[in-house]
Amino acid sequence: MSVANLSYDPIKKEYLLDLRMFLDDFLVVTGALPENANPFGQMLASPTKNEVRTYLADHFKIYFNNDLVEQKVDKVKIEELTIHVTIIIKSSLDPEAIKSIKVLDTIYADEFINQRNIIHINLPGKSKKSLLFNRYEREEIASW
């Protein structure tokens, strides 16, 4: 499972996406670790920021009011068995102007049949929403 939280920083006037994915799954889907390997008890490789950025560019997209927004991978940190990614989304839209957020999320979905991904959306002035993705549900829309 991957879990993401979308929030807004009113001081910087930018959206932040905080994403956590399992490290061993990332290594399997990128070919660095065989799928049947048992990574416990051994040192796992650490993906580079560029490898994570490239993977997410193909597997995670966000649209505000049907317009694709630019995502900038700001930080990539390995935390035990997870990859913690901080993504900055710059948009001229204030949260109040957003009527819908569409997310395309195929993180690990092609490789793992039971993969589940979730994104929690918590923006000022909006009711909280959560979107769930899996192998068959790859595109979801939150509307206000």
Image (tube, rainbow, N blue to C red):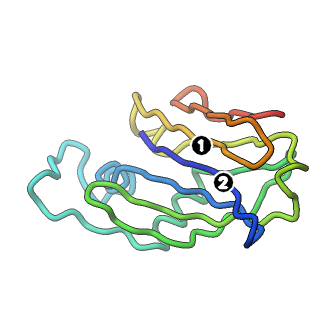
Q: Which residue is pictured at 51% across the width and 59% down the height?
A: 55
Q: Is residue 26 left or right of residue 45?
A: right
Which tag is nearer the camera, tag 1 or tag 2? 2
The percent position of residue 40, horizontal first and vertical second, equals: 13, 51
Q: Which residue is mark 2?
A: 7
Q: Is 91 or 44 nearer to us in this picture?
A: 91
Q: Residue furthest right?
A: 97
Look at the image and tell me in which quarter the C terminus lies.
Answer: top right
Closer to the chain start, of discs 1 and 2, is 2
The percent position of residue 143, horizontal first and vertical second, equals: 81, 33
Look at the image and tell me in which quarter the N terminus lies.
Answer: top left
Q: How far is disc 1 from disc 2 in space, using C-alphas?
A: 17 Å
Query: Which type of secondary structure does the marked residue at label 2 adopt?
Result: strand
> Could you classify mark 2 by the number of other residues whose Cα lies within 10 Å: few (under 14), some (14-19), or many (20 or more)?
some
* Amino acid residing under circle 2: Ser
Depicted 112 relative to depicted 84: above or below: above
Q: Which residue is pictured at 34% across the width and 48% down the height?
A: 25
The percent position of residue 64, horizontal first and vertical second, equals: 81, 49
Q: Which residue is pictured at 87% across the width and 49% down the height?
A: 96
Q: How many marks?
A: 2
* Amino acid residing under circle 1: Asp
Q: Which mark is residue 105?
A: 1
Q: Is residue 123 left or right of residue 55?
A: right
The percent position of residue 82, horizontal first and vertical second, equals: 34, 55
